[in-house]
Structure formats: structure tokens, C-alpha cells
Amino acid sequence: MIISIFELILLYLPLILGAYLAISLMQIPNLAIESSFLMGAIIGSLFTNYFANHVFLSLGISLMAAGVAGGLTGLLVACLHLYGKLSLLLSNIVTIGATYGFSIVMLGGSHLTLNQHNNPLLIINFITNYPMLPTLIFITILISSLMFYFFKTNLGRICAVYGHNLKFLAAHKISTNYVLCVGLTIANFLAGICGYLVAQNNGFVDTSMSKGIALLSITALMIGKIFLKSKPIDFKIPILGTAGYFLLQTSLMSLGFDLLYFPLIQAAALTGIFISQNSRHHLNLGV
Amino acid sequence: MNKFFLVLILSILASAIYYFNQSKLAPNQYRIAILTPISHGALEEIIAGFKATLDTKLPCVFETFNAHGDRVLLRSQAEMIIQSHKYDLALVISTQPSLIIKEISKQRNSNLPIVCTAVDDPVKNGIIKSLESSGNNITTVTESLDQQYYQKQLEHLNKLFPKLKKLLLVYSPGVMLDREKDLLAHTCQESQIKLTVLPIFDTHEIAQKIKLLIPEQDGVIILKDNTVVSCIETLVQICQQFSIPLCASDLNSLNAGATCAYGVLEAEFGIQAAHKAYAILHDQKNPATVASSQVNQASFQVNQKSFNALTNLQTGVKKP
């Protein structure tokens, strides 16, 4: 069971890393993360089917296609906000509508069963009972390393500053438009990759697979933030948050808890935590 | 504070694992997991049919996992059923949970017998190899929907509404429902009924789109379509407003106000699944050798109240 939870963490970690960048650091209400998740799942899976006979090629190209599909969704939000002069929330809503229509066209319906014989996540398969785990570990290490490196760069630090002190960027003549575009593109790129991984793991894609993904991301970030003291950039927050979320969910399931009430209790508990934390110091999650 | 929550969560986890491993059963009792994606009338009937049938044959304890429409939770629940090694059999309802549990079962090399019921074309969806022999630890119960099924449905509909010449099909496109739509379109063509198709992708679209097309129609027909059936009340209301009949393909929709319905009893999916579970648990049959079956005893039923409320004489309503 522990390895299964570990696998779930690896599956959803790219999404939470993206959410950490956009929602927590840049403090953008990035609801379009759901659309990016869905677009990544659809486009990545279509590429996998197209390159079915070249599994090695398929993995790289499908992952990249899924990420690009997600990234373009994020870029659309940024462009609508910057050049369409829509508020960020409205840009997100318009993007969600647009990508939903596009996803139906791409999928040719609402559901697509994937051919598991061509699943590129089984490419490095040497762990019994967990055939996707090695590939997932490889992908997670790769993504985490790139993100770790990104947060060490000036642009990464500027993304963190963007959410906390916008005036600082203006004072140093740094283009906030550029930072917004890059931040949203990277965050949604990661959500797209996560969508693709989840679709391959489940064996199908459907238009409702992204429902609740934004809430999952925010909850995981909240859990991560509760565990750790607030720092400008702390890579452990999304990792601990994802782990905490799935550990909690699995524990409650094991206890036979009716998960119908899970969102309600989750919201009540988190509100209580926020109020108690905020009474002492400001717990800034950017959400 | 941070340490407190860390300790709290770890305590919950530890106690959950302890409780999970300690739960005991009476001797000779079978433990059965039921995985359902959401709660609604039809699915509850399937579960009730399964429990009632199996309870009379074997001493069983049932544990229901309901994902409440949450896909992440559904996957975790499927994982829990496969990984816990405490169940003797799993009943999985509808196509998407079946796809997920099949995938996890395959990845984990699990031998847990699985009975999937109310599944759309399990062979085409890759759940089993063939209806005779699944080639894995799964057996299925599916619905037989062929040309004959729709011919009978239209025959009944024509008897009830002889002047019905124009039908509006409201459906959500998908691999399986597209096939059913084609079958219905072909049957309508043979019966000289003009079928207009209204594809919808989300429940909120129904009320927006249908009002543009409905004034020209003699009746509305719907398939066994979760998206459309989940907002049947909206369709009932609109059809009543325009005084035209609504023909459903599941009998449960009659309770919501559909004029007539042609379909199978949902409980039958549960009953057939229970027979397969009995064969696996009691007769020690391998799920791969338990042939998949189809529920095909459909019946035509009329909601008298809705029927009487129809006042549109253009449809040529004749009271049954």
C-alpha cells in the first residue's frame, strides 16, 4: 500500500509543483490548471497512439506534447489577461470554456480508451507489480531537477517575488508581463504532463477527468504549508503536501470513513487551521 | 503547531493501518468489495440486486466504495481494493471504474476475481479478450444493444404514438453511444422516422440547446446515457412544456417523469453479477472461464401520469 501511495505521489507531483509556482509563489488564481491537465492528457495520448510503434520516441514526444498543450493553455490565460484586458479570473474562465470545446473536438467525443500495449510508461519495467514506477521515478526526478534549477535562476526567484512584491519588479524595470507569461506557461506545462501520466495510468481519457484537480492542488499546497515554516521558495512544500494529501485520503479510506463527507470535513479542518495559524502569523498561500 | 499536525496525521495513518489489518470475519464468510463511481437510482438498484441475490446463497460481508464522482478518489479506492488482499471478490459497476481496476489489477499482477457489471462493450474497451473467455481475472455483465433492440423500441413507440414522424435524439457523444446512435438512426430510417440528433457534452447544455429544436419535433428519445439521464428532470419539464412525449432507454427514468421507457431492469445487472460471483466463490471457477453475459430482457413501460398529461393532438396519442 505504501508503494501505491508513493506511485500516486509521483503521478500528481508535477501538477502540485505547477500549482506551487502559479498559485502559491506567483499568487495567481490559476483555475485553468484543470484545462491544462485535460489538454495534456488528450494531446499526449493522441501522440502516443500516433507513435504507437516507436515506444522510446513516443514517451519523449508525448510528454513534450502534453506539456506544450498545457503550457499553451497557461499562455492563453496570460495573453487574455495582458492583451485582452480581462481580469485574471475571467481569463481563466474563458480559457476553461475554450479548451473544453477544443478537447471535445480533439477527442471526437467524451471518452477515449487507450491501448495499453503501447503504454510508454512501461518502457523501464523491472519492478514486479509496479511496472510504471521506474519510469515515473525517472520523469519525476527529471522534472524536479529542472524545477529545482529553475527556482535557483534569477527568473525563478523573480517568479517568487512576483506574487509578494510586484512593485519591486517595476522598480527594477523587470517586465511583469514577461514573468506572468513564463510563470503561467511553466505551471500549466507541468499540469499537462501530469494529465498525460494520469491518463496513461488509468487507461483512458475522458472530458470529466480534470474535475476537482484545482481543489486537489490547493489542498495539497495547504497541507504542505502547514508542515513547513514559510520561506520564500521551499521545494519541500509541494512534495510534503502531495504526500500528506494522499496519506490522509488513504488513511481515511482504510478506516472505512465515508468520503462523501471528506471535502466538507477537509474544508472545515483547513479553515480552523488557517484561523488558528493566522491569529499568530500570516500564513500566505496566495489562494 | 506544525509538529502537532504531523503527529496527528501519522497517528491517523497508523491507526488506520492497524484497524485495517485487525478487522476480522466470521469463519466461512466472504468479503466482497463493491466499487461504484457515483450514487444514483440505477446504480443503487444494481447493488441491491447483487446483494440480495448473493446473500441468499453465501454468507457475505459487503463493503461499498463510492467515489462520489471524484476520479482521483476512484483510483485510490480501486488501488485499496486490489492492494489490501482482504477481499475475496470485487464487484465493479460501469465502464470507467472497470477500466481503472483492470489496469491496476494488471499492473499489480493481482488474482482477485473481479465481476464488472453494466459495462459498455468490454471487448472493444479492452477489459476482456472475448465474451467467452476473458483471458484475465475479470468477467463481465453487459447489455445487449443491437438493431433488433431499437426496432422493438420504435415498434412500441409507434403503437403508442402512431403519428410520430419526427424524433429528437439527445445524447452525449462517445465511442459506445455513437454506435448506439448509428443503430437508432438506421432503424429510424427503416421506419421512415426523421431523426434529428442533438449532441450535448455537459448537463447544462441540454436546457440551452433543446429549446431551439424541440418545437419542430413529435417526440424526444434518449439513450442509456449517464450525462443525459443525470438531468432527466430538465428534459421532462421541457417536453411537458411542449406537450410531446419523452421516451427513455432506462426504466428508472419513468420515475422522474419520462412518458415511456424501453429497457432492462437495472437490478438484473446485479443479479447476473451475483450468479457469476457465486460460481467463482462457491464453485471455485476461474473468472477467465466464467463467460461474460448480456442482459437482454427489455420491457416497454408507460408512465400513465405523464402520458395522460400529453395534450398535443398532433402526436396522435392513443391511450394504451
Image (cartoon, coloured by chain):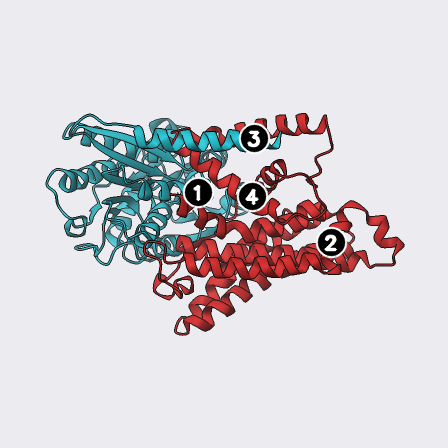
Image location of residue B81, percent across then percent down: 32, 40
Residue type (three-letter) at the residue carrying disc 1? Val
Label 3 to label 2: alpha-carbon separation? 29 Å
For residue B228, which numbered disc appears in the image?
1
Image location of residue B273, percent across then percent down: 22, 40
Residue type (three-letter) at the residue carrying disc 3? Phe
Label 2 to label 1: alpha-carbon separation? 44 Å
Q: Circle 4 is placed at which residue position?
A: A240
Image-quadrant location for residue B75 = top left
Residue type (three-letter) at the residue carrying disc 2? Cys
Marks 4/3 in contact by CB < 8 Å: the verdict is: no
Q: Colour of chain B?
A: cyan
Disc 2 residue crowd, few under 14, some 14–19, many 20+, Cα 10 Å: many
Outermost residue, left direction? B283
Q: Circle 3 is placed at which residue position?
A: B5
Quadrant position of the N terminus of chain A in the picture: top left
The front one of A212 and B236 is: A212
Q: Is residue B136 left or right of residue B208?
A: left
Label 3 to label 1: alpha-carbon separation? 43 Å
Q: Height in image: A275 above or below A117?
A: above
Q: Circle 2 is placed at which residue position?
A: A159
In which chain is the residue bearing label 4?
A
Image location of residue B86, percent across then percent down: 27, 37
Marks 4/1 in contact by CB < 8 Å: the verdict is: no
Disc 3 residue crowd, few under 14, some 14–19, many 20+, Cα 10 Å: some
Q: Height in image: A174 above or below B161?
A: below
Q: Colour of chain A?
A: red
Q: Nearer the viewer, mark 3 or mark 2?
A: 3
Residue type (three-letter) at the residue carrying disc 4? Leu
